[in-house]
Amino acid sequence: MASETAGPAHRVQSAMVEYGYPQGHLGHLTPHEEQTLREFKALVIEKGLYKPAAATDEFGTHDDALLLRFLRARRFHVQDALKQFKDTEDWRAANQIDILYETIDVDDYDATRVLYPQWTGRRDRRGIPVYIFEVKHLHAKAMAAYEKSAKTTQSKAKTDSKIPPKLLRLFALYENLIRFVMPLCSAMADRENSGTPITQSNNIVDISGVGLKQFWNLRAHMQDASQLATAHYPETLDRIFIIGAPAFFPTVWGWIKRWFDPITTSKIFILSAHDVHSTLRSFIEPANIPKKYGGELDFNFGDMPVLDPALEQVVEWRGPQKDFPHGPLFWVARGDKIDLKAVGSVNGKERSEYVCSVETKFKGHNLDAEETIPAATNAPEEKEDGVTVQEGGLQTSQIEAQGTSGEDATVIQDAAITDGSTAVPSESEGVVVESGEVVTATRPEPVSFVTATEDLNKLSLKQDEKTVETELNGVTSSPHVTITANLLDPAVSSQG
């Protein structure tokens, strides 16, 4: 029997809880993590794999924020992180990724951009960039044309021929993420934790209108792209919201989830149709959500970024142009500012144009930089809403459980992932805990979603349904959508 209430918004025990932003990032490291970073940094320098960025080097490469991405991906295990870092450096050298990005034809680059995840020009409530990906555009005709054009991509890069051209062009977009979008979002001071650089992105993945045949035809390409991105651009994904899932998606998910490591799958949320608006609004301001998904932003897939007004205010444009040009862009550090450089090739001629400047507090995102970001301590930090929490130590699952009798939602602490030293604010105090954040109870909260670390089983994804149906190990009377939520609800577990 289907439950009569939508299941609770919740977190499962996973790396997402351990290292969800800002935990595990600069300014929010435990003493052990800070020491591990120093050891890792010394090791990659010793191995000749890393050279600290000089003042004139490109902003956002080879800095502490980048090293931390590899450490988080390997749960701060130095030797594992070293292997992944070395493999990535070898891969980048073999395929001349920097040269590819800086010399690729602008039209070739844009032909790739319009097919894959695109930055909206907006950020979530924490200042992390929001991307949109409409998978339906990767239909057979478009992919055939893209693969044909990719074979003649214009760039000065020489590759080892092991990576298909269509994937190399895709990785030019990842370079744009880490060299253009992330540094710009990091420079913004209008966010909580403004002293912590942004090294991740949110993705709204719309799979509406995608048939089973299209999923099947895309499986090899998407698998290769996902695995290479996980290997060489680790920890660049924050939350991934899958929306518009067809009724057969639980079957498809069975083989899709094998493409990702557990850390990545723990960040994926699969939303039923009636929960898209409420869930997205709980993480992203309505002004920054495209109208198509219940927000207020005039943005359609394929558009150039629609800049956040706050971003527009900090950009100092050079010349008459007041918008970012098409093609590859990256930032160059210059004292207290970063300068945006437009590169790539136009009609066979390389361009090298400075577009604008932005002031920044960062000196290369380094732990030992002139403006050192302090490590997390055990001292309590006072949040704006007056709730005291342990900085860097709040690792609490959000369980907003609603029972069958209609009791108010409650917040339940997951004892498996906390040492019990941090008190969890009650709902009566006007706050809830969300992935290490304390947020006001007046902020809209998600009604239900299912994390991809759990089997979807018979999750109903019909567009017109207002309840979520699932079968959990043969138990059909449990009040919550997912196994984890039922296990963590004392009322349910006591019945077993």
Image (cartoon, helix red, strand yellow):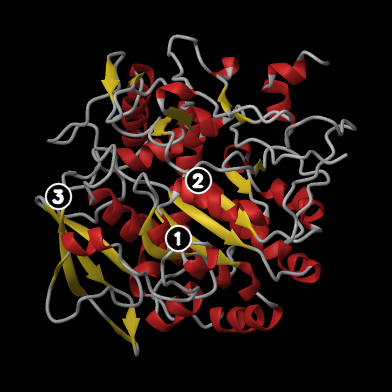
Instruction: Identify residue for label 2.
Output: 87
Q: Which amino acid type is marked by label 2?
A: Asp
Q: Say what secondary structure mark 2 lies in.
A: helix
Tell me the mark number nearer the camera, choosing from 1 and 3. Answer: 1
Query: Residue 350, located in which quarter of the rendered image?
Result: bottom left
Mark 1 or 2: in front is 1
Q: Which mark is residue 55?
A: 3
- Which quadrant holds the N terminus? top right
Q: Mark 1 is on which residue type? A: Ile
- The percent position of residue 284, horizontal first and vertical second, equals 43, 51
Compute the Cα span from label 1 to label 3.
Answer: 36 Å
> Are dots 1 and 3 in contact, CB under 8 Å?
no
Give the class, few, some or many, for how many residues have Cα within 10 Å of label 1's Cα (few <14, many ≥20).
Answer: many
Q: Specify whether 427 is left or right of 12.
A: left
Q: Looking at the image, can residue 237 be seen?
A: no
**Vertical order, 325 against 452 (above or below):** below
Q: Between marks 1 and 2, how big is the CA–CA gap?
A: 37 Å
The local secondary structure at tag 1 comes to: loop
**Mark 3 against mark 2, which lies toward the viewer?**
3
Which of pointers 3 and 2 lies earlier in the amino acid sequence? 3
Q: CA distance from mark 3 to mark 2?
A: 26 Å
- What residue sits right under mark 1 in the picture? 289
Percent of width and height locating residue 198: 34, 46
